[in-house]
Amino acid sequence: MKLETPMYLGPLPHPAVGIRIPEVLLEGILEAYKLRNTAGGLMLSYGRETAPEWVIDAPPGEYEITMGHTGTSIRRYLTLGAEAARRKGVIVEMEADHLTITTSSARAVKRISGYKEVVSLSDEEVRAALDYIRSEVEEAASTGCVNFFTIDTCELIDYRYDSLSGAELEEAFYEEFGRGEGGKLLSRYEGRDFVFVGETGRYFRVPMPRRRVMQLALKFRRSLDATCEVLRIIRSLVEAPFGVEIAFDETPHVTREDELLFYLAELRERGLRPDFIAPNVGFEKKQDYRGDLRELERRVERLAAIARSYGALLCFHSGSGSSPWSGKGPGTYEALLRATGGLLKYKISGIYYELLMEILASYPRGSRQRSLYERIYGEVYEYVKREVEEGGPLDSPALRAQLREYEEVVKRRDPYDPRASLFRYYSFLALNFRDEAGRRYFREEIVDLYNSDEEFRARVDREVKELTLRLIDGLGFGGNVEKLRESSL
């Protein structure tokens, strides 16, 4: 395969990392990729981290603060990432992460903090979301740099059907699908046992009784339809080769084997073969994995076997742990490697910003770096406190608990603790704090500090590089350029 940058990598095992402040993060990330001869992804989430220029440049307060909260537009991160990779001689895939059917970026943020809200979107809301996604893809395509798209339609999964049975289920199924389409759907699955062989040689079967087929078909109908509609939008706007990943993890429970099987099989029926799919394997955002590692390995092995039978690999979202240097907790990377044979993709994003905050916090009191950090901390605290007091978009039981913990415990011990849950989950807001002129003053000051302070820049580059190397080495992504060179689609 001819290699260039940026380029579509195909189903190649690789890391994909978020570049929330590309002016600050790219050097360290790309240096790590280069040192390990690694092709990797550079991305931002379109559901919250980035947005089209018309959102980024809008007057303060016109959109949710969580919408494009990095202050980095789609055009800017794609062009800066591609240009930096070319200068560095590193192969990257520029990814549009989480093209999301949603009505609220704030809801996605609340999920990150631990509040899992199940919503029901109207057809009109879905159409509005698709229109917004079209504008996102238009800006991405106009750069000529985008190679990959992750599609997230999890908010359209209808969990009500999991509890339906008997005549009520039959009636709902045939009302939705009719006898013709419903009969064809049942004929593909009903009464069949699907057999798979895992990475360790352990085999297993996934039964598909009539009741379960009907439940799954009803549960996923709108999500599947919307996924295909997003793909049609992408195909109409992007001429260069591109790949697709399915975000299947923004759900209130761990993904079942029959759910992954049905979803991938129905995507194939509709002409879509994703390179990756990201199930919910039990990872919590910004937390080390705290469950049983043997159970995780068994779960992932089975899901990986199902995915590979449909030509896809697993991707792991929510890849950041409880601190910048914890990975996902002791033994987690090793369990994933055993379960997948190393054939996986792994995403991290917010942890780089957390690392940046910890670096700022480490400087002496009164220094420029520490003063900037304390101002960020103070304004974030005051903002989320107002959100709770006024019942704002970010208010949730999880935020109220984090605020209470901070005020009653953390604040008395260290009012600027960088690892306080309240700050870890909400410090990102600082990048989108704006003055009356519309300036993102904290974002600008961070970039200026990086550009003007040689010692600070060198330290950030070094620690970002080391964090990226930890990911590459921990999951065996080093040298994947040679695999890419020998691959073909």
Image (spheres, rainbow, N blue to C red):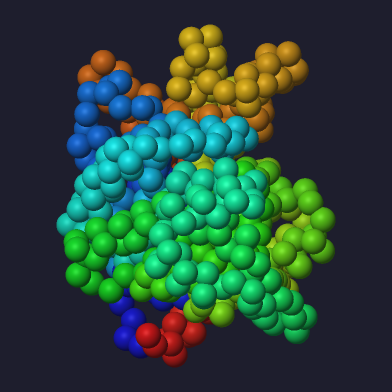
Residue 340 visible in the picture: no
| Foreground of the two, 415 or 212 | 212
**Residue 387 % position (x, y):** 49, 16
From the viewer's perspective, is 295 left or right of 189? right
From the viewer's perspective, is 256 left or right of 428? right
How many marks on residues?
Answer: 0
Q: Residue 295, located in which quarter of the rendered image?
A: bottom right
**Residue 54 % position (x, y):** 20, 37
- The quarter of the picture where the C terminus appears is bottom left
From the viewer's perspective, is 142 left or right of 32? left
| Foreground of the two, 220 or 436 | 220
Against 448, residue 298 (above or below) is below
From the viewer's perspective, is 253 left or right of 335? left
Which residue is situated farthest in the bottom direction here? 486
Residue pictured at 72% horizontal, 64% vertical: 299
**Residue 285 % position (x, y):** 61, 44
Residue pictured at 45% horizontal, 22% vertical: 393
- The quarter of the picture where the N terminus appears is bottom left
Residue 427 visible in the picture: yes
Against 347, residue 400 (above or below) is above
**Residue 10 % position (x, y):** 41, 76
| Foreground of the two, 372 or 248 | 248
Residue pictured at 37% horizontal, 70% vertical: 270
Q: Residue 419, located in which quarter of the rendered image?
A: top right
Which residue is situated farthest in the top direction here? 389
